[in-house]
Amino acid sequence: MGTPAHEHWTDLTVRRPDDVRTITGGRVSLSWQMEKRAGHVDRLMNRTLPADFPEPVERGDAGDVLAVLALSESMRRDLAARRGGDIREAILLGATWTEIAAAIDATPDEARAVLRDWTERQHRLHRREVERGRPLGSDSDRHASVLALIELADDEPMAAGA
């Protein structure tokens, strides 16, 4: 038996990326999105089975394809939104810019640009949300610490304990 949130998600019809919301309007985890997407893909794959297939199967339709497209876009957006945070985490855990660049199929400078864009957005978010009484995003100290990571040389790991 699932939680009410998961049951809501399971029953939800997805046709647009913006449909991917929890019962309270928040984001849905990537694992839940993948699970729902896999179900639609399975039904679509069943379309390739012969008409006289001996087992009962549910065959996909246009709604399944639309759900796959919408879920794929939602997941792409979610992954892109957290990419900078993942890069920051990699640096903090000892990865170099060269290693990160290889992992995202980019140059070290392109990887730095992803982190710079992410930290600038997080800093703007913080300034805006502090005015609303919600401490979200990166304050000035955290923003400065992330900018310092960008200055590391391509093959220079962050100093241990820093």
Image (cartoon, rainbow, N blue to C red):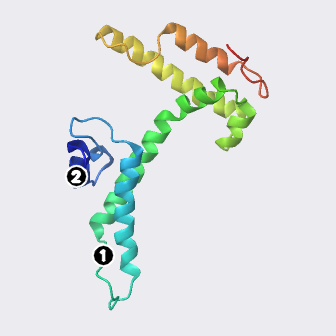
Residue 67 versus residue 57: which sits nearer the camera? 57
Numbered circle sitting on residue 12: 2
Left or right: where does residue 123 sit relative to residue 135?
A: right
* Residue at image point 54% right, 26% down: 117
x, y (%) of residue 131? 32, 8
Numbered circle sitting on residue 59: 1
Above or below residue 126? Residue 27 is below
* Residue at image point 78% right, 24% down: 156
Q: What type is the residue that disc 1 sits on?
A: Arg
Labels 2 & 1 near each other (Cβ < 8 A)? no
* Residue at image point 43% right, 18% down: 137
Near mark 2 (Cα within 10 A), the count class, few <14, some 14-19 or many ≥20, is: some
Would you say residue 34 is visible in this rendering?
A: yes
Q: What type is the residue that disc 2 sits on?
A: Leu
Question: Element under label 2?
Answer: loop
What is the residue that sits farthest to the right in this orientation? 155
Q: Earlier in the sequence, mark 2 or mark 1?
A: 2
Above or below residue 42? Residue 151 is above
Total numbered labels: 2
